[in-house]
Amino acid sequence: MTTVDVDRGQLRNQDFDTTVRGACPHDCPDTCAFIYHVKDGRLVDVVGDPDHPMTRGGLCVKLHDFASHHYNPDRVLHPQRRTGPKGSGEFTRISWDEALKEIRERWTDIIATHGSQAIMPHAYLGHQGTLNGLTSGDAFFNRLGSSVAEKTYCESTSSTAWIMTVGPTGGLDVESLAYAKYIIVWGMNMTSTNLHAWPFVLEARRNGAKVVVIDPVRTRTAKQADWHVAIRPGTDGALALGMMNVIITEDLVDHDYVEKYTLGYEDLKARAEEYPPDRVAEITGIPADDIRKLAREYATTQPAAIRQGVAIERSRGGGQAIRAVTCLPALVGAWRHVGGGAVEMPIWEFPTNFDKICRPDWIRPGTRVINELDLGAALTGELELDPPVMSLFVYNSNPVSQAPSQEKLVRGLQREDLFTVVSELFISETARFADIILPAAMQAEQYDIMITWGHLYMMLNQPAIAKPGEVLPNVDMFRRLAKTMGFTDAYWDMSDDEMLLEFYDWNAPQLQGITLDLLKEQGYARLNVGAPDTRAPHAQGEFKTPSGKCEFRSSAAANGNFVVPVWRSMYEEMQPGDPVDPVPDYIPPYESAVSNPDLADRYPLSLVSPKPHGFLNSQYGNEVYQNKIQGPQKIVLHPDDAAERQIETGDTIRMFNDRGSLEGIAAVNDTVYRGLVLANVGYWASRNSSGTSVNALSSDKHSSIGMAGSYNDILVQVSKVNGQVKVETSTGGAGRRS
Ligand SMILES: Nc1nc2c(c(=O)[nH]1)N[C@H]1C(S)=C(S)[C@@H](COP(=O)(O)OP(=O)(O)OC[C@H]3O[C@@H](n4cnc5c(=O)[nH]c(N)nc54)[C@H](O)[C@@H]3O)O[C@H]1N2
Ligand SMILES: Nc1nc2c(c(=O)[nH]1)N[C@H]1C(S)=C(S)[C@@H](COP(=O)(O)OP(=O)(O)OC[C@H]3O[C@@H](n4cnc5c(=O)[nH]c(N)nc54)[C@H](O)[C@@H]3O)O[C@H]1N2
Ligand SMILES: [Mo]
C-alpha cells in the first residue's frame, strides 16, 4: 500500500499492516485528523485523513515526520534524577518508585514547614487533550491544596474580551469563511498558524472575496492577500475605533441590527468620535485614507468576516482591542449572513464539564492564585509570597522558552532550595533545571479526546503503538501521584472512558447522535451546530451575554480584570482586579516612543516575536527536518535600520534591552517597516549562540484584560556583534551552547 504525503507531494511508499485513527496533539486551531500507519508494532507514518473536511489529507511541516519524532533518541523514556548543578542537564536514570518516593518526601516536608500553597503547578498546552491537556493536573493540585496556577499564556485575554462582548459563543465557523465576500485576517499569520483554514479563504477569493491582512509584518500570509495593512503592534484598538468612526460618520451602520441585537450603541458612538482617522493614523501608522477605505469596504461588502488572531492580545491594550474588533460585525450587521461575523475560537460550542475535570470544589477557601507568566517574579521573590514557592511541578509546558523575562526565570529556577519536577518528552530548556524528570507519553501512545479551538469537530486520538520505556500519559501520572499522596477519592479510580463520559455532557444538543463508540469508529464527528453553508449563529442576535445582545457596553466589565475560569483552574471567586472600562477603548502600549519616550531613546525598535513556521512553540526546535525548514534564529530588520547600524544580511547581531539579550543572524528586508524588528519564538536557547531565546527580551507585564502576556509590547536595540560573542545575562543564559 502507498500513501500520499501532501506536504511534500510525493509518495512515501511506506508498508504498513495496521491503520489507527488519531488526532494531532498540538496547541493549534487546526487539530488535524490523523491516520497512523503501523507495521509490526512500529509507527511507520502519520498522514492526514483525506476525508476530514479541514485536514483534507494534508499535514503541516511540523508534523512532516511525526512517526520518527516518536523514536527520537533524545526522548526521555525513564524517570531521571539530577546529578549535576541545576541547569547542567546532567541526570541519571531512577525508577518510578524512587521518583515518587522522593516527590512524596519532599512535598510532605514542604507542606509541614510552609503549607501546601508553597507548591506551584505550572502547565500549558504541550498536549491539547481532555485527559492529558491544559486541565489534566487541576484536580490533583486542587486536592493537594497547592497554589492555583492562572494559565494565561495564550487566549485568556482574547477569550475574556470576546465573552464580555458576545458571550461564550463559537461565532463564525472557519469553514463558513468560504461564503464571505470580504475577509479581514487580523493579527494572524494563517498560512503558518491556521493553515487548514486557508483553503476556505482561497475558496472565498475564487468567488470574488477580497482578503485583507492587518499585521505589522508582511508575512507569508500578507504576501498572499489582496491588501496588507501594516499596523504598529499594540494599536489595533485604535484602528477598530477609527473604522467605527468612519462607519458611524458616513452612516454605514446597520441600524436595524444595532437596535434589535446590541447594547450600548450611544456609548460606543461617543467613544468612536474620539478616534477620527487622522488621529488613528498617527497612532497606528496607517494612512488616514486607508483607514477610511478599510472601514467603507468592510461595512459595505457583505458578508464580511474577521479572522482574529491571538497576537492582538499580546500588548497592554490587547483586551480592549479585541473588544473593539469584536464589536465591528454587529455594527455593520455582518452576523446576519452565512460567512459573516468573526472567528475567535469555537471552543465554547463543546459541552465540556470543566468543573468535573478540574474539581474547583476541592480548592480550599482562600487559596492564592499565582499567574504563570509571573513565574520568574514568583521564584526570585520579586513577587512577595508568603509562603514562598518551594516546589514547582511543570508539565505540558516549557516556560524557559515560552514565558516572559527569561533571565529572571532562569535565576529563579537555579534556586538550590527549590524542588522542581518536570514531566516531559525531552530534556527541554525547562527540564534541564529539574530535580526530577518524569517521562511523558507521545500522541501515538495515548488515548484522548482532543480539545479543539479552531473548528467544530470532536476529535478522538487512539493509541497506535505500545508505550516505550516507562513513559506515562499525564492522566496516568496524576493517578499515580494521587495514590502516592494517599488520595482515595473515586476520581482517581475512573478509567479513561469513564472520565470522558463524565467530562462531556453527552446529552447536550451539540452532541446528539455522537457517542464515544462512534468516535472510536470514525475518529471524529462534527458537532450539531449547523452546517458551514447555512450556519449564521447570530443572524437574530442570540448572543450568549447576560443581556442576550452584543454588548458594546459590557455588563461583565464591573468585575474588573477577571480571567475566564478555564484559565484559572476553575477558581470560583472571580477576583476583581483593575477597573475595566465597559466601553472599548485604545490603551497605548507599555513600551513605545509615545508612551515611554525615555525608554525609546535607549531602545528605539519595537519587537514582535510571533510563531515559527517550522516549530510548534518550542516543540520540534530539537528536530533536524524542522530546523532545516525554520533555519537558524533570525532577527529581521528594515534596510534603513540595518544601514544605520552597519548591519548586513547574514551578520551575527545582538538584540538587547534591560531585561536581557539575544543573538541571531540578521535578515535585512522590508517585510518589517522602519522601527520594527522580528525574531520568532520557539528556538531552543541552547542552540542559539547567546544561550538565550527571544523571551530574554520580553516583559512580564500583562494585558489590561484577561492577564495575557505582552510579548509584542517590547522595545529593544540592535547592534552588530564583533569578534568574541558575549553573553549578557547574569546567569550565562538559559542553556548550554552547542
Ligand atoms: N507553525 C506554527 N503554528 C502555530 C504555532 C506555532 O508555534 N507554530 N502556535 C500555535 C499557537 S499556541 C497559537 S496561539 C497560534 C497563534 O497564531 P497567530 O494568531 O497567528 O499568532 P502569532 O504567530 O503570535 O502572530 C500572528 C501575527 O500577528 C502579528 N502581530 C504581532 N503583534 C501584532 C499586533 O499588535 N497587532 C496585529 N494586528 N498583529 C500583530 C505578527 O507579526 C504575526 O504575523 O498559532 C498556533 N499555530
Ligand atoms: N515571545 C513569545 N512568547 C510566547 C508566545 C509568542 O508568540 N511570543 N506565544 C505564547 C503562546 S500563544 C503560547 S500557547 C505559549 C506556549 O507555551 P507552552 O505550552 O509552554 O509551549 P511549548 O513550547 O509547546 O511547550 C510544551 C512542552 O510540553 C511538552 N509536552 C508535549 N506533550 C506532552 C505531554 O503529553 N505530556 C507532558 N508532560 N509534556 C508534554 C513538550 O515537549 C514541550 O516542551 O507560549 C507563549 N509564549
Ligand atoms: Mo498559543
Image (cartoon, rainbow, N blue to C red):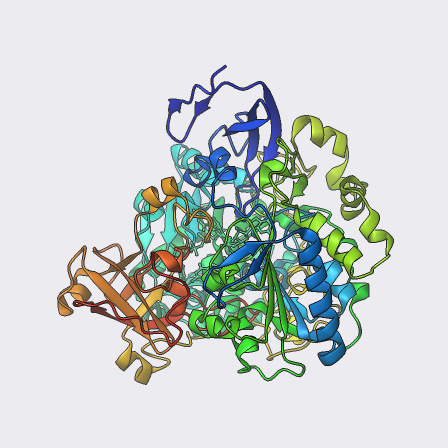
Q: What is the count of numbered marks?
A: 0
Whether residue 251 is visible, yes or no, is no
Look at the picture and state if 531 lies above or below 484: above
Q: Residue furthest top?
A: 1
Residue in the picture at 76% in, 30% down: 517
Q: Quadrant of residue 280?
A: bottom left
Picture coordinates of residue 111, whole percent (x, y): 74, 74
Q: In this rendered view, identify the residue nearer to me: 6 or 142.
A: 142
Look at the picture and state if 171 lies above or below 16: below
Whether residue 386 is visible, yes or no, is yes
Picture coordinates of residue 120, whole percent (x, y): 65, 69
Answer left or right for 217 relative to 254: left
Picture coordinates of residue 368, whole percent (x, y): 70, 76
Look at the picture and state if 166 lies above or below 17: below
Q: In this rendered view, identify the residue nearer to me: 8 or 137.
A: 137
Residue in the picture at 55% in, 55% down: 92
Picture coordinates of residue 547, whole percent (x, y): 71, 62
Q: Quadrant of residue 260?
A: bottom right
What is the quadrant of the C terminus in the image? Answer: bottom left
Q: Quadrant of residue 732?
A: bottom left
Residue in the picture at 14% in, 69% down: 644
